Image (cartoon, rainbow, N blue to C red):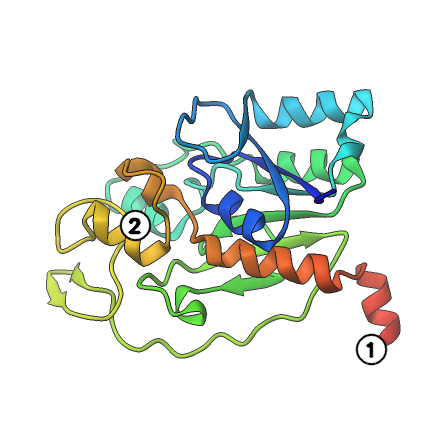
């Protein structure tokens, strides 16, 4: 039987596809309906759902939990835009609450966030260039209850294509967020990230490349160790 992963705040399933490729059976949970999600899906509030599973003991069916809680409050792009327009405090930050409910499960977990001010440990940082992708899409991952060796962040080959601060630059990567200003088209985003099952721009702009979680899932399944075990063997 394949190990079972609970995918919280799952959106369109970029993370799910990677974990499935690594060898997990995946069950997604999101507060919004996700008809294009490529695995078993439950529509529910992710945090309340985990609390119910933990209280009933059903959480023990799972091997690991992945969570991508809303991150707009701390994302670099959002913080900069809000500051420039005099905005602030408009987005919910669920990172701390998510960590609390994951700790209560007793299961190994991963919390994913973009670069920015989100309060997570940056145990692992992954970038599209590490996997030969057409996006950079830097993402940080906090590992709970397990650890693995941090990969080296490789040098980028050039710019992200598009306008920034009034200057247009060409480059080997596309900007998979927003619209206009040279940002990626939907087909470009699909190709750059390796996501074929959705052509909805909003879902693609929120997704992480499956290559990221395939790497994480494979590392977990082939060599996961509790943090204290790593320290003792160092």
Residue that sits furthest to the front in the current view? 1
Picture coordinates of residue 70 (x, y %)? Answer: 48, 37
Callout 1 environment at 10 Å: few (<14), some (14 to 19), or many (20+)? few
Callout 2 environment at 10 Å: few (<14), some (14 to 19), or many (20+)? many
Residue at numbered disc 1: 234
Q: Is residue 224 above or below residue 63?
A: below
Residue at numbered disc 2: 190
Secondary structure found at label 1? loop
Q: Quadrant of the C terminus?
A: bottom right
- Distance from label 1 to label 2 (Cα)? 41 Å
**Camera-side mark, 1 or 2:** 2
Picture coordinates of residue 30 (x, y %)? Answer: 51, 27
Q: Is residue 15 above or below residue 230?
A: above
Query: Which residue is painted at 77% across and 52% down in the image?
Result: 145
Query: Which residue is painted at 25% across and 65% down in the image?
Result: 160
Tell me whether circle 1 and circle 2 mark residues in contact (CB < 8 Å).
Answer: no
Query: Which residue is painted at 59% across and 27% down in the image?
Result: 46
């Amino acid at each position: 039987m394949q190990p079972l992963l609970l995918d919280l705040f799952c959106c369109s399933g970029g993370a799910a596809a990677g974990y499935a490729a690594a060898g997990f059976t995946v069950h997604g949970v999101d507060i919004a309906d996700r008809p294009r999600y490529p695995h078993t899906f439950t529509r529910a509030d992710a945090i309340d759902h985990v609390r119910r599973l933990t209280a009933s003991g059903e959480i023990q069916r799972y091997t690991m939990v992945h969570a991508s809680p809303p991150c707009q409050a701390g994302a670099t792009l959002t913080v900069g835009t809000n500051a420039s327009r005099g905005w602030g405090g408009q987005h919910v930050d669920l990172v701390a609450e998510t960590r609390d409910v994951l700790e209560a499960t007793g299961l190994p977990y991963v919390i994913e966030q973009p670069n920015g001010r989100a309060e997570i440990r940056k145990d692992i940082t992954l970038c599209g260039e590490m996997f030969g992708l057409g996006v950079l899409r830097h993402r940080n991952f906090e590992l709970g209850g397990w650890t693995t060796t941090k990969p080296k962040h490789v040098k980028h080959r050039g710019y992200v294509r598009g306008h920034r601060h009034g200057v247009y630059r060409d480059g080997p990567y596309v900007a998979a967020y927003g619209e206009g200003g040279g940002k990626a088209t939907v087909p470009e985003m699909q190709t750059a990230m390796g996501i074929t099952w959705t052509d909805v721009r909003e879902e693609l702009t929120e997704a992480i490349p499956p290559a990221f979680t395939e790497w994480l899932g494979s590392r977990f399944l082939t060599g996961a160790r509790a943090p204290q075990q790593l320290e003792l063997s160092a």
